[in-house]
Amino acid sequence: MMRPFAEKILPEGWTLLVPQARYKHPQRGYTWWRYEDFDADVTRRMALSRKELVDVDSSLSQLEKLIAEEAPLGPLVVGGFSQGGAMAQELLQLPIADRIQGVVCMATRLVRPMELRLRLDELEKKRLFWMHGEKDVRVPIEDGWAIAHLFESAGWAVELIEHQKGHMIPIEHHRALKEWLTTFS
């Protein structure tokens, strides 16, 4: 579902990988981890369950393998929307983190904040593009702000877009992300 958006914002000459998440969502699309219950309140929990974290780690293995096969060399910019943005952050835990020049987090949350904070202290300071909607009922904006604050406190350059809408990527902000990406070229 993200491919048309990703193709629209992709700078010329870049290679695009849009991996398919591994778990079927009960309503539509796919997810990187299965919530034990899809009730909105469950997605707002501060911490994932052990089962959900096992899914995250399994998905990380899938992503690591895909990157090794499809983009084995060179700099990377990783990112995503909702669970995809969380997985982009989790990629910083892997050996490929040194190749990651930028992270895009849209309408997402932290998965393992303490571990990520420690890892960010070990890594070279890079750049984060952050976007979240004030009316997001799936992932509260406060959870999103926790990402921005964590990366800022680690010394990363953070580009922030807070919009008036919900759990979405408003079309009026597509250009801002494309422009941010072109600064890596």
Image (cartoon, rainbow, N blue to C red):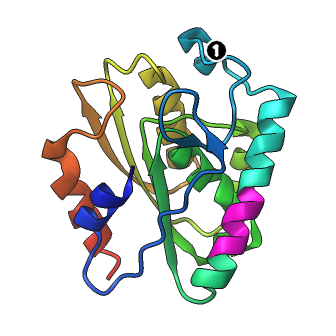
Q: Is residue 43 above or below residue 159?
A: above
Q: What residue is disc 1 on?
A: 42
Which of the image's four quarters has the C terminus? bottom left
Q: Is residue 22 above or below residue 95?
A: above
Q: Is residue 102 visible?
A: no
Q: Looking at the image, which residue is at 42% across and 16% down? A: 137
Q: Is residue 104 above or below residue 77?
A: above
Q: Is 14 inside the magenta-drawn segment?
A: no
Q: Residues within 10 Å of mark 1 (few under 14, many from 20)?
A: some
- Res 83 quadrant in image: top right
Q: Is residue 60 visible?
A: yes
From the viewer's perspective, is 15 left or right of 9? right
Residue 51 drawn at (x, y percent): 84, 32
- Res 157 quadrant in image: bottom left
Tag count in the figure? 1
The residues colored magenta run: 60-66
Which kind of residue does numbered mark 1 sit on? Val
Q: Is residue 91 above or below residue 140?
A: below
- Res 111 quadrant in image: top right
From the viewer's perspective, is 104 left or right of 143? left
Is the stretch drawn in magenta largely helix, strand or loop?
A: helix
Q: Looking at the image, which residue is at 60% across and 51% down? A: 21
Q: In what element is the residue under mark 1?
A: helix
Q: Looking at the image, which residue is at 67% across and 20% down? A: 46
Q: Is 62 inside the magenta-drawn segment?
A: yes
